[in-house]
Each structure stands twice: as C-alpha cells, then as structure tokens.
Amino acid sequence: MGTKITPYTAVSEETKKKQVERMFDSIAPKYDFLNHFFSMGIDVLWRKKCIRILKRETRTPRTILDMATGTGDFAIEAVRMGLPSHMTAMDLSQGMLDVGIKKVAAKGLNDRITLIQGDSENLPFQDESFDAYTVAFGVRNFENLDRGLSEMYRVLTPGSLAVILEFSKPKSFPVKQLFGLYFTHIMPVLGRLVSRDPAAYTYLPESVKAFPEGAEFLERLKTARFIDLRAIPLTGGIASIYLGRKPGGEK
C-alpha cells in the first residue's frame, strides 16, 4: 500500500486529509505563482496535453469532473481550448477554491465551470454522472487511494475516460540526478523563503517518492476495474499521464 506521507508529521491527531486541506488553505494566495515558478511553466504544457487527449475522444465529454482542481487552472484551460463541456471543479481546500472562484468570475466562465468543495473519497454525485474525470497533481494526496479510485470509477459513465496527471520519478541519467537535486534540495529551500507554509514544499517531494507510480499505479487502476490502461511519460519521466477507461458504452 506504500508509505503514508503527511504534510505535518508532528500533528499525529490530524488525518492526512485534514492536513492536506490545511496546507493548501495556507498556501492558496501564492499557489498559482509558486506552482508555475517551481515547474518553470512546464505544468501548463502537461495540462494542455491532457486536454488534447480528451478532445480526441470519439464521444466528446459533455460533463467533466476535475478533482483536486486547486484554483481551477485545468478547468479554465479546458474551456479555453474548446472542450464543449461543463466542468465541475472540486477541491478539498476552500482556500484554493476561493481563489479559483475569483479567477472563473473574472474570465466570465461562471456558466461553464462550477467550483465546489468536496472529498475525492466520498463524492456527492450519483453513479454515472460524468463523461470524464480529470485530476492533475492531486491523486497522490488521496488519503485512501483505492477508495478514491473506486469513487472515480463509480461516477463515470460507461466508456468514459479518466485522465490522471501526476509527478513521477525519472529513471534516466542525467534527468534523474538533476530532478532529484532540484526536487529534494533546492525546491524545499525556495519554499521556505517564499511560502507561508514551508512544510508544503517538503511534503511535495516526499509524497512523490511514496506514490505508487508507473506499472504499480496502473495495477491499482486495474484493481478499480478500469481498462485500456496507459502511462505516458512526460519531460524525461518527471511526470506521467495515466489513462483508464470505464468499460462499456461508446469509446
């Protein structure tokens, strides 16, 4: 099942879920800047690749659940790139959503994107409610990964696609060594200098190390009954897109 990593190791009475919520609430005001700064903007390209995958679907998704939406970047970009969908953008952190609500309103997208607070492991939706499920850099924060994947499967319509973007651990020289240096040593130091919550940028590399990536994560998707499984490495293996489809329906 892997090692359980939490943002605040000394706060043993809080669940991982509660700690993650508190952590993102604390960094929400600077999250967008720090996210793009630390990734050098590459995260934007990765999100666009996920959206292009959805646009190539034979049956264009009309309703999409974007889990762990943060401040809504994925949902906003999906609309901007022409996905004719209504986006339900959900996050555990109300602080992040408050920033996202302002961004969506400023872009005039209130009729296309609905932001709500919620828990990936206990979704407030009926079975088969969405034509696609997306989650960018959030699945490793699920307290109970298998429960979260089960809920992902439950709310998808038959034949629909789950698109999961997550950091991974590069295997090849010199990307492995450079990424390890930056992620493990440089990023936490910068995080302490510019973030209200430096623990967030220590938790990030630790949570990536503990996440069951690659074939192991695909096996978890298989256990959750997804089919047509794929892992697409990005930028030398720094991140990966995982695809899984709910059986049935028109692909």
Image (cartoon, rainbow, N blue to C red):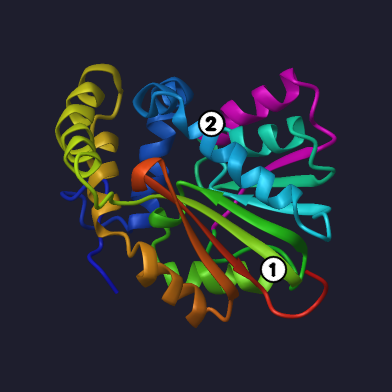
- Locate residue 61: give its quadrant: bottom right
Image quarter in which the N terminus is found:
bottom left
Name the residue located 53 percent from the left edge and 47 percent from the top edge: 68
**Residue at mark 1:** 155
In the image, residue 142 sits, relative to residue 236, either above or below, namely below
Residue 84 falls left or right of residue 188: right
- Between 250 and 211, the one lying in front of the other is 250
- Between 26 and 85, the one lying in front of the other is 85
Residue 146 falls left or right of residue 227: left
Residue 82 percent coordinates (x, y): 80, 36
Q: What is the count of numbered marks? A: 2
Please name the amino acid that badge 2 sits on: Val
In the image, residue 60 sits, relative to residue 77, either above or below, namely below
Q: Secondary structure at mark 2?
A: helix
**Residue at mark 2:** 44
User: Gap in Å between the C-alphas at discs 1 and 2?
Assistant: 27 Å
- Between 21 and 151, the one lying in front of the other is 151
Residue 162 percent coordinates (x, y): 62, 61
Residue 227 falls left or right of residue 155: left
Eye-nearest disc, 1 or 2: 2
Instruction: State whether residue 70 appears in this view.
Output: no
Name the residue located 20 percent from the left edge and 39 percent from the top edge: 174
- Locate residue 215: give its quadrant: bottom left
Mark nearer the N terminus (1 vs 2)? 2
* Residue span colored magenta: 96-119
Single out the residue that lies furthest toward the front.
173
